[in-house]
Amino acid sequence: MRRLTLALLFVPSIALADAAATFNQNCAPCHAKDGSANTPAGKSTKAKDLRSSEVQNKTDEELASQIRNGKGPMPGFKSRFKENEIGELVAYIRALAKK
């Protein structure tokens, strides 16, 4: 966990741009491009608003684990994303709360 946290402190802006594209393709259908979960799929699955304190208060490892393994109706993405891509998605989720 410590390694993931330290790595996220130094995610270059180019990686966040890549993460935005990955997020928009794979996560936005439920979580919306702004993370609000204000989409038909998000509403029907009761997806979490990624900008909320409930999500933002999770540790980086908790978020990464949820991306890897899924939770409830959310599928796991460990077979689709490399570990560094998961870390970049966690950083991108953190950035959504700051917009």
Image (cartoon, rainbow, N blue to C red):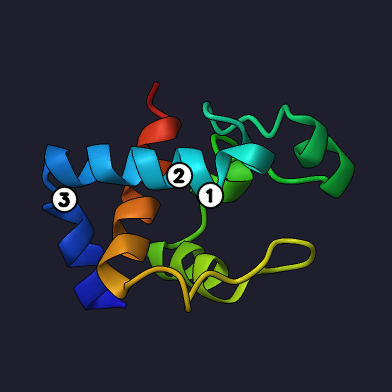
Label at residue 11: 3
Residue 49 shows up from this direction? no
| Contact between labelled residues 1 and 2, with CB atoms less than 8 Å apart | yes
Residue 89 at what x, y percent from top left?
38, 52
Q: The residue under label 1 is which amino acid type?
A: Asn
Label at residue 26: 1
**Residue ID for mark 2:** 23
**Quadrant (top left, top right, bottom left, bottom right) of the N terminus:** bottom left
Label 2 and label 1: CA atoms lie apart by 5 Å
- Left or right, 87 with reference to 64: left
Q: Nearer the viewer, mark 3 or mark 1?
A: 1
- The residue sitting at 25% across, 67% down in the picture is 84
Residue 20 at what x, y percent from top left?
36, 38
**What element does badge 2 sit on?**
helix
Binning the other alpha carbons within 10 Å of mark 3 as few (below 14), some (14 to 19) or many (20 upward) gives: some
- The residue sitting at 22% across, 57% down in the picture is 8
Of mark 2 and mark 3, the one earlier in the sequence is: 3
Q: The residue under label 2 is which amino acid type?
A: Phe
Q: Nearer the viewer, mark 2 or mark 3?
A: 2
